[in-house]
Image (tube, rainbow, N blue to C red):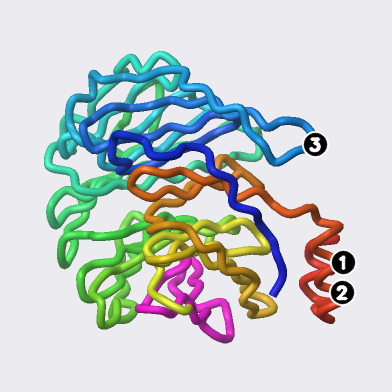
Amino acid sequence: MHDAYEPVPILEKLPLQIDCLAAWDDWLLVGTKPGHLLLYRIKKDAGTNRFEVTLEKSNKNFSKKIQQLFVVSQYKILVSLLENNIHVHDLLTFQQITVVAKARGATLFACDLQQSSSGEAKLRLCVAVKKKLQMYYWKDREFYELQGDFAAPDIPKSMAWCENSICVGFKRDYYLIRMDGRGSIKELFPTGKQLEPLVAPLADGKVAVGQDDLTVVLNEEGVCTQKCALNWTDIPVAMEHQPPYIIAVLPRYVEIRTFEPRLLVQSVELQRPRFITSAGPNIVYVASNHFVWRLVPVSIATQIRQLLQDKQFELALQLAE
């Protein structure tokens, strides 16, 4: 094991309960249980692991619990799940742009942002409404239907895009739904004893899928791409991919591992972590109900030195690249 990250406190003893996070560039959005949306600017002091944290905006107009947030900085929009519907707000003014009227009753959504060869961003949205999945795409400041509704076998509890498929976790099983016009569905495997599915998108277009304390990686065909599953020391509640590391939030700490080679890299003790989000490479935030930490990467040179001492040459080579 070696130190890949150092946890640095960003927000401490926040009086409002945190329910979701989103981040981009130097900005952190915190959605709270009473419906307040907090926007923080986080600037790193040069040469140190200290941060200047400024509350830039507090919006109380959301009025109800903020269930889920997703930032699309390319379009300068914020997609959120509020009062069981999909809302889109301007990222900097928080002015509402649109509401997806057909998505009333939504319990979950997943966004997918693809960069075309011309450099244009293409945003797709999948929304779970009861036992249905609705598909949309973003154009001219509005979400339009991508195709007809898809009937699901149960109410989705977790989901993520996987290239042109969507991996969906239900209470008992995982399914893969192909966005090929026919909406073909493939049953994958049970969720495990806990009946709490976890699907997390990975940086390479694949998905990490949890089965109790195990995680497997699937491609858009639903085929496992790793020889062996990752085995965590507890059951992850959230995951974030920061190649070559996969970071899991466990009930009492954050665990950092690698897929290839399969290594436990680091365990970071934090008080009851629940959420994790990233603003891009090397910018990761973890939150509990009232605290937010930033996981600051240890310098590559220091990591490589430690890995060479431990004779972990394969991982040292990955970091050197």
- Cα–Cα gap, marks 2 and 1: 5 Å
- Please say if 314 is above or below 21: below
Q: Residue furthest front?
A: 13
- Residue neighbourhood size for the residue with mark 2, other residues' Cα within 10 Å, grouped as few (<14), some (14–19), many (≥20): some
Can you see residue 207? no
Disc 3 crowd, CA 10 A, few/some/many (<14, 14-19, 20+) = few
* Camera-side residue of 69 and 161: 69
Side of 318 where 37 appears, left or right: left
Whether residue 305 can be seen here: yes
Name the quarter where the N terminus is drawn.
bottom right
Quadrant, the C terminus: bottom right
The residue shown at (41%, 66%) is 252
| In contact (CB < 8 Å): disc 2 and disc 1 | yes
Q: Is residue 319 left or right of residue 122?
A: right
Label placed on residue 305: 1
N-term-proximal mark, 1 vs 3:
3
Q: Which residue is mark 2?
A: 308
Q: Amino acid at mark 3?
A: Gly
Instruction: Identify which amino acid the numbered label 2 is placed on.
Output: Leu
| Of 133 and 233, the residue lying toward us | 233
At 53% from the left edge and 67% from the top edge, which residue is drawn? 255
Q: Name the residue at 47% across, 79% down.
A: 233
Q: In this picture, is 60 found above or below 165?
A: above
Q: Which residues lie in the magenta part?
A: 208-232
The tag on residue 47 is: 3
Give the Cα separation between the discs numbered 1 and 3. 20 Å
Query: Residue 154 location, x and y as percent?
Result: 15, 65
